[in-house]
Image (cartoon, rainbow, N blue to C red):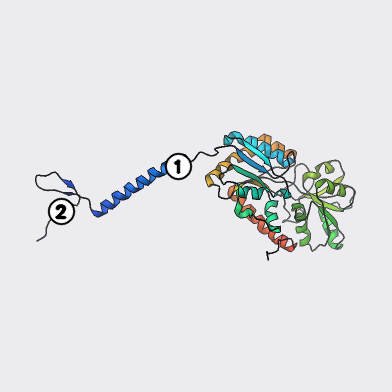
Amino acid sequence: MRHNRPNTLFHIDAGKTPVRRDTPALTRRRWLRLGAAAGLAGALPALRAQPPFPARPLQLIVPWPAGGQTDLTLRVLAEEAEPLLGKPVVVVNKPGAAGTLVAPLLKAAEPDGHTIGQVPITVYRHALMNHVAWDPLTDLAPILQVSGVSFGLLVPAGSPFKTANDLIDWAVRHPGELILGSTGIGTTAHLAMEEILLGKGVRYVHVPYKGTADQMLAIATGQIMAGVNSTGFAPWVDKGQMRLLATFNATRNPRWPDAPTLRELGHPQAVYTSPWGLAAPAGTPAAVIQTLHDAFHQAMLRPRHTELLAKYDQSIDYLGTRDYRAAVLATVEREKKLLARMNLLAKPAS
């Protein structure tokens, strides 16, 4: 004979008030709900304790001397970003070591977004060429790419070379006779021309200079046959003291529309603009990186900033966070191969 199962939720005795009887499964579920609620309640004070970002003024590390072109444009960028962030952005100049001091300073900073820095591409190259106590690929968190500079191939005003290909073809026919200057071993100016000449099998004499002024004087007076430099050459070209044969931009520079790009002249790899951007310490929360990106992206497009960039022959070269990181990784791989061919990679530690 089949017996009726007792009610699993209530046990009912005749004449008595029903009494709740939970099954083991229901009991477990009730305890889990109670535990989850208690855990959430315990977490809420901690969540409320986290201040909104930014909670205090920001520091923007500029690894160049105060008063230079990059410093001045970054100060305007910081001023334009302040009302968007709701806090002051204080520029802190830390010049030296070819602009690479920003990397160890960011590595040592708290990863909360209140310390950020301008990061030139030379930071990544320096780490390939030297043994350093930081790794820009793992110690820095890219925010966005802002701009770059224009590099040009220059010759004295009276040079017989009328085009870039005239110079390159002559160098191919006269191994070891071309005397060409740059702003230093391993600089973008050096690598830009080296990649072209290596591809052509050209041997030449490289003369590194410590600064733009010395190099420009050497070109203008014919001490060297040619040179590569960024837009520090503008006054010399405008005064007719040297000739701009070509630029290393992806497209022609509007200031010198008659100067072709080397890519136009059949050298597709010769696109060098030494791009730079902003970065935070690695480990900075993604939401904070997004806030910084959005504020500085708007600030960089403000007329006051773009007009100052144009004054120094620079233009906006924006990349968002993800694309900026991808571009950095691609540049590092490209330059690693080129530096290896030039025997400039840091030797493995013994």
- For this view, does 295 lie left or right of residue 127? left
Picture layout, residue 302 above or below residue 15: above
- The image shows residue 227 at horizontal and vertical percentages of 82, 52
Mark 2 residue element: loop
- The image shows residue 289 at horizontal and vertical percentages of 56, 45
Asked whether residue 156 is in view, the answer is no
Residue drawn at 77 percent across, 41 percent down: 255
- The image shows residue 258 at horizontal and vertical percentages of 79, 45
Instruction: State which quarter of the image contains the N terminus.
Output: bottom left
CA neighbours of label 2 inside 10 A, class few (<14), some (14 to 19), many (20+): few
Mark 1 residue element: helix
- For this view, does 7 lie left or right of residue 103? left
In-front residue for pair 197/126: 126
Label for residue 226? Answer: none
Asked whether residue 40 is in view, the answer is yes
Q: Amino acid at mark 2?
A: Pro
- The image shows residue 154 at horizontal and vertical percentages of 83, 49
How far, Cα to Cα, is label 1 from label 2?
47 Å
- For this view, does 15 lie left or right of residue 342? left
Q: Which residue is mark 2?
A: 6
Instruction: State which quarter of the image contains the C terminus.
Output: bottom right
CA neighbours of label 1 inside 10 A, class few (<14), some (14 to 19), many (20+): few
Q: Which residue is mark 1?
A: 47
